[in-house]
Image (tube, rainbow, N blue to C red):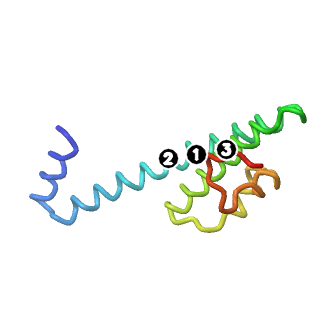
Amino acid sequence: MSLRDSLDLIRAVRPEAGTAALQNEIMAERASSLGTAEQRVAKAIAALEAAPEDARAEPLAAARKAVWEYFVQRELCGFRRHQDVIQDLRIPPQVLLGLGAMHPTRKPR
């Protein structure tokens, strides 16, 4: 039985339940996506910290992109304040300085 069949059956019994089931699916997907984005940030920050000083441009760009994507995902989930996760994930200032209005695929000058 597909999700669509399940929703049709639920709507036949209780129409409002079909929407609730779909909303629960969406919320679960958002939570999963947010967790995945946070893991990418943690990996990117670790790679940046492990990089030698003379080879940090690429890991820095990757960290900025991962953090930007994570912040966008958080905002889509309704989380507007990022200060706590900046501290929890130990996001360095040089990563945050490159976010601003910068497009995530462009490399800093």
- Report x, y in % for residue 99: 70, 57
* Extreme-front residue of the structure: 109
Q: Which image quarter: residue 60?
A: top right
The kind of secondary structure element at disc 3 is: helix
User: What's the mark number on residue 33?
Assistant: 2
- Report x, y in % for residue 4: 18, 47
The kind of secondary structure element at disc 1 is: helix
Pick the front one: 55 or 34: 55
Q: Which image quarter: residue 79?
A: bottom right
In this view, 75 is above or below 41: below
Name the quadrant of the N terminus: top left
- Report x, y in % for residue 76: 49, 61
Residue at left offset 75%, top offset 41%? 45
Pick the front one: 5 or 38: 38
* Extreme-left residue of the structure: 12
Q: Are marks 3 and 1 in contact (CB under 8 Å)?
A: yes
Q: CA distance from mark 3 to mark 1?
A: 6 Å
Residue ID for mark 1: 37
Q: Count residues near mark 3 (Cα–Cα under 10 Å), then give few for <14, some for 14-19, many for 20+.
A: many
Residue 83 falls left or right of residue 104: right
Q: Amino acid at mark 3?
A: Val
Residue 29 falls left or right of residue 45: left
Residue at left offset 76%, top offset 51%? 95
Residue 83 falls left or right of residue 1: right
Q: Amino acid at mark 2?
A: Ser
Q: Count residues near mark 2 (Cα–Cα under 10 Å), then give few for <14, some for 14-19, many for 20+.
A: some
Q: Are marks 1 and 2 in contact (CB under 8 Å)?
A: yes
Residue at left offset 76%, top offset 34%? 47
- Report x, y in % for residue 57: 79, 39
Q: Amino acid at mark 1?
A: Ala
The kind of secondary structure element at disc 2 is: helix
Residue ID for mark 3: 41
